[in-house]
Image (cartoon, rainbow, N blue to C red):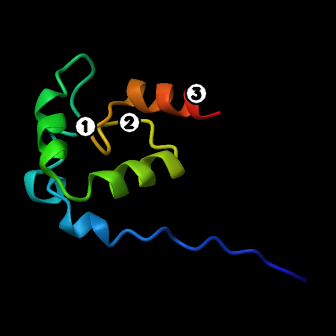
Amino acid sequence: MHIETISPADTDWQAQALCAQTGADFFFPEPGSSVREAKRICGLCEMRSACLDYALANDERFGVWGGLSEKERLALRRTSR
């Protein structure tokens, strides 16, 4: 019998990300709220590309990841197909 296991994605980048130092409120705002501040922080973060890769690979549907909102990530996934 063969059992496949899913290895966790490398998430070492998360400890170095600026969002880990600022708190989740900016990155998971209430519906209709601005994501401008989250995007500004993401723009300064060296882990931005790793964050976006993680969000796309794990189908993150909420919040700002890698500088992109939910709608922007959805549009990116659609154009990548």
Which residue reaches farthest bottom? 1
Can residue 69 be seen here? The reply is yes
Tag 1: amino acid: Phe
Residue 78: which disc? 3
Along the horizontal axis of the image, is 45 left or right of 56? left
Q: Which residue is mark 1?
A: 28
In the picture, the quarter occupied by the N terminus is: bottom right
Foreground disc of the pair 3, 1: 3
Category of crowding for the residue at label 1, using alpha-carbon neighbours closer than 10 angstroms: few (below 14), some (14–19), many (at least 20): some
Q: Residue at x 52, y 51 (%)?
A: 57
Q: Residue at x 58, y 34 (%)?
A: 80
Q: Nearer the viewer, residue 25 or 36?
A: 36
Tag 2: amino acid: Phe
Q: Which residue is mark 2?
A: 62
User: Relative to residue 71, is residue 57 depicted above or below?
Assistant: below
Of the image marks 3 and 2, the number of the one nearer the N terminus: 2
Residue 21 location, x and y as percent?
10, 59
